[in-house]
Amino acid sequence: MERKVKVAAVSYLNTKPLLYGLRNHPVMDMMELSVDYPARIAQQLVDDEVDVSLVPVATIPRLKEHHIITDYCIGAEGPVASVCLFSDVPLTQIKRIYLDYQSRSSVALFKVLLREFWKLNVELVETSGDYEHLIQGTDAGVVIGDRALIQRHRSRYIFDLAEAWMRLTSKPFVFAAWIANKELPAAFIAAFNDAVGIGIKHLPEVVAENPFEPYDLVTYYTKNISFPLTPGKRQGLQRFLEYLEEDKSFIARNIPQ
Ligand SMILES: C=C(O[C@@H]1C=C(C(=O)O)C=C[C@H]1O)C(=O)O
């Protein structure tokens, strides 16, 4: 490839360890990096505005071609802490649920869990801007990322989606993975894989660089988010894609084209 590889990453704290090693790494000479929230970078990859994204895995069915190019992901093997249903009332008293406009994977996961695990009949409401203030009384909300870590201090009931997924399937969950929408040079892939792995071995430095009061980032990076894309996580991902496949109308209904 003559031109630089365009790479888009998630702008949340959960991605900082994956970006840490890119700085001062030779791979930076081969690429351009941009960051945004997950739903935006998903659209950029579908529209071919970028070549690689840390893309929500729920976007895979919308890509003509996809290649998972690294050994790292945003995953969880237990409670993830930052992808939750937040509520003032117990599950059975919830009437309406606001869905996070920044998310693709977690909203799709939530719909799977509503159907297969919680079996609730509630009104779902799409959002397009700030909505956390609407989470009160019998109105609940799915919130992801840094905003979820803040919302943990505001809501009485917290239902962790990764934990629920593990109860349903006994498999880990993958929220996002580094995915290319075309073949990329092997030299770039090798260098990029090396660079994104560096931060996982330097978590204390990553935490020191990102002061954050609402939640302990050491816990977040070591006990909640799980970065290695293991065979177990690939199985969990496969299982999730099968659930999405079962609900064929999922894409048409839930993802604006
Ligand atoms: C665990 C998280 O994973 C994220 C959830 C995503 C989604 O719901 O589409 C996409 C990317 C990840 O950053 C989180 O943001 O809290």
Image (cartoon, rainbow, N blue to C red):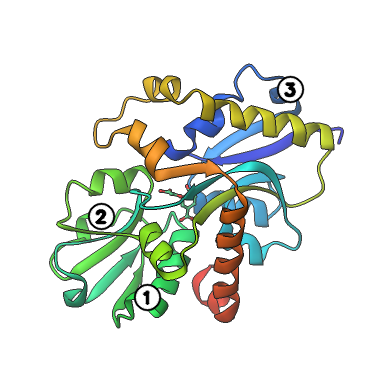
User: Which residue lies under the disc numbered 3?
Assistant: 29
Q: Secondary structure at mark 2?
A: helix
Residue 182: mark in rendering: none
Give SS at disc 3: helix
Q: Quadrant of residue 213?
A: top left
Residue position for label 2 = 132
Crowding at label 1, few (<14), some or many (≥20) Cα neighbours within 10 Å? some
* Amino acid carrying mark 3 in the image: Asp
- Amino acid at pointer 2: Glu
Residue 36, percent from left and from top: 51, 42
User: Which quarter of the rendered picture does the N terminus lie within?
Assistant: top right
Residue 257 visible in the snapshot: no
Q: Nearer the viewer, mark 2 or mark 1?
A: 1
Q: Quadrant of the C terminus?
A: bottom right
| Numbered disc in front, either 3 or 1 | 1
Q: Position of residue 208 (x, y in %)?
A: 37, 20
Most foreground residue, 147 or 221:
221
- Front residue of this view, candidates 241 and 255: 241
